[in-house]
Amino acid sequence: MNTLALQSGEDGGARTAAAEVYGRLRVDILSCKLTPGSRLRFEDLKEAYGVGISPLREALSRLVASGLVTTEGQRGFRVAPASEADITDIAMVRKEIEGLALRMAVGKGDDAWEANLVAARHKLALLERRNAKEEVNEEEWEARHRNFHLALIQGCGSPWLVHLAELLFDQFDRYRRMSVKHSLSGEPTSLEHQRIMQAALDRNADGAVGMLHDHIDQALSLILSTGISTPA
Amino acid sequence: MNTLALQSGEDGGARTAAAEVYGRLRVDILSCKLTPGSRLRFEDLKEAYGVGISPLREALSRLVASGLVTTEGQRGFRVAPASEADITDIAMVRKEIEGLALRMAVGKGDDAWEANLVAARHKLALLERRNAKEEVNEEEWEARHRNFHLALIQGCGSPWLVHLAELLFDQFDRYRRMSVKHSLSGEPTSLEHQRIMQAALDRNADGAVGMLHDHIDQALSLILSTGISTPA
DNA sequence: CGGTAAAGAATTTTCGAAAAAAAATCAATA
DNA sequence: TATTGATTTTTTTTCGAAAATTCTTTACCG
């Protein structure tokens, strides 16, 4: 696979406590279970995640570098604050990066890329259809949604571009989840996904990228319209 | 200032040992004093940087997230390895990101941007002129060089774009310093800087971006021509 | 001889407590 | 009453040692 191996989580080494709690913290920040701007006290974190201070500090340090957590001097860590200016910037940059990657993928993606994309779309659609009837795991939908967007651009052949796109997708996703709380994006989004994929498979770069931009713009409008709660 | 505040290093909080050693490790990795791919043993690091394990692990964790260090399972940390594929990818993405940011800066940069840019260029030129006669601090040149490239794009108004550009600049810089060892890029580079700045001030976006691309391509050629030493 | 298993050494990772810093409380003074 | 300054409390940060894991060496057996 053509991916940046920073933390080669898979092979060989057993999962460390720091890596484990990093993943859990990340999920809780993206889901806004940990509210933007709030302080992260070690006493609470130790309790909540059942590990000591050392792995917690490691995990938080990693999250600082990816922009989901901030830290200052000897004053501890906080969840990254949220603002309209921030999400507006994130949306703009995400459109550029993910758009570029998608264009490249459409240009040079091979059979494996197509197959993986179709598979990712299918897994997402399955869950969305199921969600019409029964209640479905929110976190699972998030994972499959992220995976679909990733699959779209994987064919671009640039590990760094994919890495940056992931970074911005996560940032964007946190804001989306601030506003839409508990309503798995419904029909319209699902259809957009379908259309973007089809354009990509048809090797229609302009079409795919245009739709991706609209997709992001629409989500941004929704986010901005609900307003961003910024507790002091 | 319009900048991402992940680790608000300035105000308030006193500099922590972890933050301090993060900076020093970063410098040593970028300068290739710590060779690409090499293992980072805590015994050695403790000795070299005069701190305990805790701040070291924190600093290394941050560096993992910024792609200068890798880690796997319970097998410790290593300096990120180097490869031709990697630097080729980095160069491509850097051209896109920094190019876009420069274009935006040229489009909307204000007086403060222009003034800061001219100042940064001057500081760099001063050192380069001085370097013709006496020996000059390498690290100081690196800092001013980085600062010049930063000044070029600061006017773009997008904290995230600037952040990503910094990330890629650092990655690229490490490779440059692998090859050019001890020869502060001479006349030609200095002239290119001058020309790019002039085009930017003249609000000639296409010209500035084109020259920036050439600037990066030339550096890439040099890097690839010297070959990348990849010890097993 | 080659390969496999067990013992030993080296290294990483984690915990618990001490040290250092920041925040909060309270008293004294103008 | 507001403000400053000292004291206590809380919280973060760092160190040193214990636990867990990986790597190396050695011995054994097919």
Image (spheres, coloured by chain):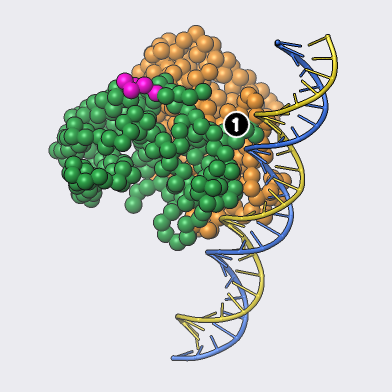
Chain colours: A green, B orange, C yellow, D blue
Number of residues whose C-alpha sits closer than 10 Å to that of mark 1, classed few (under 14), some (14–19) or many (20 or more): many
Instruction: Tell me the residue at 45%/61% (across/down).
Output: A12
Q: Which residue is at the front of the view, B230 or A194?
A: A194
Q: Is residue A48 above or below residue A213?
A: below
Residue under numbered circle 1: A72
- Give the percent coordinates (x, y) of residue A153: 28, 40
- Give the percent coordinates (x, y) of residue B94: 42, 32
Instruction: Tell me the residue at 61%/29% (across/down).
Output: B9
Q: Which residue is at the front of the view, A179 or B48?
A: A179
- Give left or right: position of A54 versus A26: right
Instruction: Tell me the residue at 62%/55% (across/down).
Output: B41
Q: Number of marks in the image?
A: 1
- Give left or right: position of B129 versus A158: right
Quadrant for residue B185, please give it: top right
Quadrant for residue B208, please give it: top left
Q: Is residue B134 magenta?
A: no
- Give the percent coordinates (x, y) of residue D9: 70, 37
Q: Is residue A226 magenta?
A: yes
Which residue range is magenta in the image? A224-228
Can I make out residue A200 in this image? no
Can I make out residue A174 in this image? yes
Chain letter of the residue beneath label 1 in the structure image: A
- Mark 1 secondary-structure assignment: loop
Quadrant for residue A145, please give it: top left
Q: Which residue is at the front of the view, B224 or A78?
A: A78
Q: Amino acid at mark 1?
A: Glu
Instruction: Tell me the residue at 61%/19% (across/down).
Output: B123
- Give left or right: position of D1 versus A230: right
- Give the percent coordinates (x, y) of residue A172: 36, 31
Q: Main secondary structure of the magenta part?
A: helix
- Give left or right: position of A194 versus C4: left
